[in-house]
Amino acid sequence: MRRLAWAIGSPSLFEPENAAWQGRLRSDQWSAGELTRCADWLHLQDRAPGALKLALGDPRVNTPLGHTFEKLVLFWQATRPDVRASTRGLMVRSGGRTLGEFDIVLLRHDGVIETLEVTVKYYLNLRPDLGIDGCIGPRAFDRMSDKFGKMTTRQTDLGHTEFGRVAIARWLENSCGETCSPDQLIVENYALARGYVFHPSIDAAIPSELSPAHERGLWQTDAMALPDDGVTEWRNLSSREWLGQYRGAADESNWPVDPAMPRMYARLEAWGAEWQEVERRFVVRADAGLLKSV
């Protein structure tokens, strides 16, 4: 339930007021309203988590984190009182060639289609002097500048393209039993961005494209030991545990961990009978090529 609540109410990764979004990025105010709306429903999921577990699938299967996050968002958005049908991963094709994919498509009761481009990202701010160009994901090819450029243009424009609308119309007919020509569709395109940026120091400069309220931590190499204050504990987080603040046992889970990825550690503080995350760090191998990618 905590991961679901984090998907709903955590701060936007990017700054929604940036002109490049054209008002399409869901803001923290919108997220706060959704979290308030979902409060009772979240408590219900906590008491009876069967439907959520079914939607997410077996945690022992090494599922890409982005897919798990999309499932959380669809599970949440499909419960909106103004939504009557939804789907995830709707492919857009032409002549056997894939042109793109809608992360989430929602059919509202008023007949309007909402598309939602969804991302959850974890970036290391390797070169604060380079702004957005200095922020790299756990794998060197995953660059914040590329993601920002794609989300603000092609990925959030897909619902207004000819073949994007054809794909939506086909889904409406095949899955919802409704016939509507692509030209008749009313489509609203939105985006949702969550995640963390790990900085080299607490006072490091941040790119203007980032939300000032974004979730953050520090990064370091494995040449340095994690700080030890004798009170808190560090826990290596498995992939799904990256989604939201950790609370639970100090012992590590047996969920899959990608050996090629940097390690995500949460500093845990005793909180009654459990441990509560109070800090998060990304630890990169000192000889990793990632550090030379910018």
Image (spheres, grey):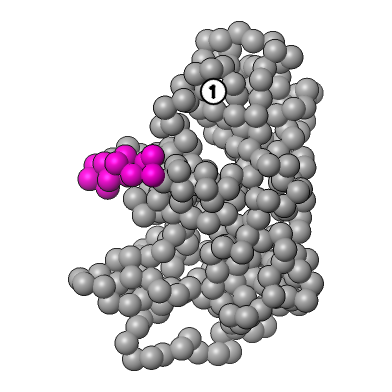
Where residue 96 sits: x, y (%)?
76, 26
Residue at left offset 41%, top offset 90%: 228
**Picture quarter containing residue 183?**
top right
Q: Is 72 placed above or below 204 here?
A: above
Residue 24 x, y percent position in the rendering? 66, 40
In depth, the one of 122 and 156 nearer the eye is 156
Q: Nearer the viewer, residue 57 or 77?
A: 77
Residue 163: quadrant of the picture: top right
Q: Is residue 184 above or below residue 3?
A: above
Determine crowd level at label 1: few under 14, some 14-19, many 20+ residues with C-alpha closer than 10 A.
many
Residues shaded magenta: 36-48
Q: Residue furthest top?
A: 179
Choose top left, top right, bottom left or bottom right for residue 210: bottom right
Q: Please say if 204 is above or below 4.
A: below
In the foreground, 137 or 215: 215
In front here: 208 or 142?
208
Residue at the spot 56% in from the left edge and 77% down from the top edge: 218
Question: At label 1, which amino acid type do we have?
Answer: Leu
x, y percent for residue 56: 41, 44
Classify mark 1: helix, strand or loop.
Answer: strand
User: Horizontal and vertical percent for residue 178?
Assistant: 56, 10
Magenta stretch: residue 1 in it?
no
Q: Is residue 247 left or right of residue 24?
A: left
Whether residue 137 is visible, yes or no, is yes
Which residue is depicted at the point 57% across and 34% down? 104
Is residue 141 at all visible to an observer of this figure? no
| Rendered residue at 74%/35% (across/down) | 157
The residue pinned by badge 1 equals 107
From the image, give the main secondary structure of the stretch colored magenta.
helix
Q: State the quadrant of the C terminus.
A: bottom right
Q: Count how many numbered circles sit on residues in the image.
A: 1
